[in-house]
Amino acid sequence: MSSRNKHISPYTTFSAEQWQAMRAMTPMTLDEEDLAEIRGLNVSLSLDEVATIYLPLSRLLNLYVGASQELYRASDTFLGKLPGKVPFVVAVAGSVAVGKSTTSRVLQQLLARWPNHPKVDLVTTDGFLYPNAVLEERNLMDRKGFPESYDRKALLDFLAKVKAGRPQVEAPVYSHLTYDVMPGERVVVRQPDILLVEGLTVLQTGPADPQNPFFISDYFDFSIYVDAATEHIRNWYVERFFTLRETAFQDPRSYFRRYGDLTDDEARATATDIWTRINEKNLVENILPTRERADLILVKQEDHSVAEVRLRRL
């Protein structure tokens, strides 16, 4: 490969300022009270950044959804059947502590305010992790979040039913307090206009299963990867651990209650060890290699703000 071709990218890259111009006349529909409910732990998010990054992104997705709805209507006309309602599925991928949840919640709120797709649901793939009892039996507790720790068959089945237009599809629920899937708890998805699916390795392919040769990403209409330098994500993870030590880890029901009384030095050492042994390894081996499969990449700076947006060319 020539040096010239080696640098060809499938993405068009925008600075935050250039991307902001794509907002056009899209109105701001969130206020400070909304943001207070959306922000994740230790993730700074301002109305200015919503206007700069997320409003243009909501406009782009609105255009994609509209085009998709027209395509489904054309297909149904060709097949001679009544138009069916099939959700537009958006994936949000990235590392632990990078801000996927905040990105997903912001998009959910913004997209639901567009008149042609007011029903927007959000499902995280955490619910499709195997229960702790299964992970312990398979010696996978230290690989929680790695591809093999998920019930891939159940997740594929869920997405296939959603894209088939089923009136009602259920997904399991995960508790970050107990660090486990909640027995008997289900979230019900009832034909939303848009479904956001947030997860660590949702863009991964890997060896095909002869019984089900499809990948999770086959069911996505659009995918977003939230990116940042590894050292920044590590720092955010440690900061979040400190915050949790003072909050959730104090709850007697917390799986991590044993970390609630750590000193600052002990907390930093523990968080750094968990990050290095588990989360960074998963990032390098499984998550980061999927970045270039995304339709859009949000590149964050050290302060969590998005400095660059990369949009895949059609």
Image: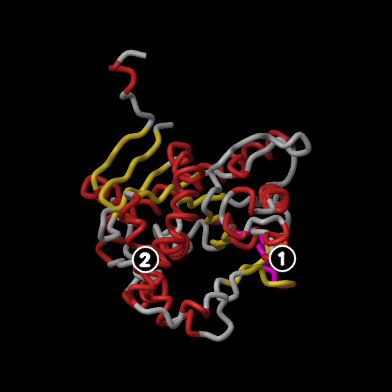
- Which residue appears at 25% of the width and 50% of the height? 307
Q: Can residue 161 be seen in this view?
A: yes
Q: Mark 2 points at which residue?
A: 238
Question: Depth check: 258 or 45 in front?
Answer: 258
Q: On the rendered structure, is 161 left or right of 24? A: right
Q: Can residue 114 be seen in this view?
A: no
Q: How many numbered circles are shown?
A: 2
- Which residue appears at 65% of the width and 53% of the height? 150
- Which residue appears at 51% of the width and 42% of the height? 67
- Which residue appears at 41% of the width and 79% of the height? 262
Q: On the rendered structure, is 35 left or right of 148? A: left
Q: What stretch is highlighted in magenta?
A: 184-196
Quadrant of the drawing holding the N terminus? top left
Q: Which secondary structure, mark 1?
A: helix
The Cα–Cα distance between marks 2 and 1, rounded to whole angstroms, is 27 Å
Q: Which mark is residue 247?
A: none
Report the predominant secondary structure element of the magenta stretch. strand
| Snapshot quadrant of residue 209 | top right
Question: Depth check: 244 or 264 in front?
Answer: 264
Q: Mark 1 points at which residue?
A: 133
Up-down relation of residue 58 to residue 265 (above or below): above
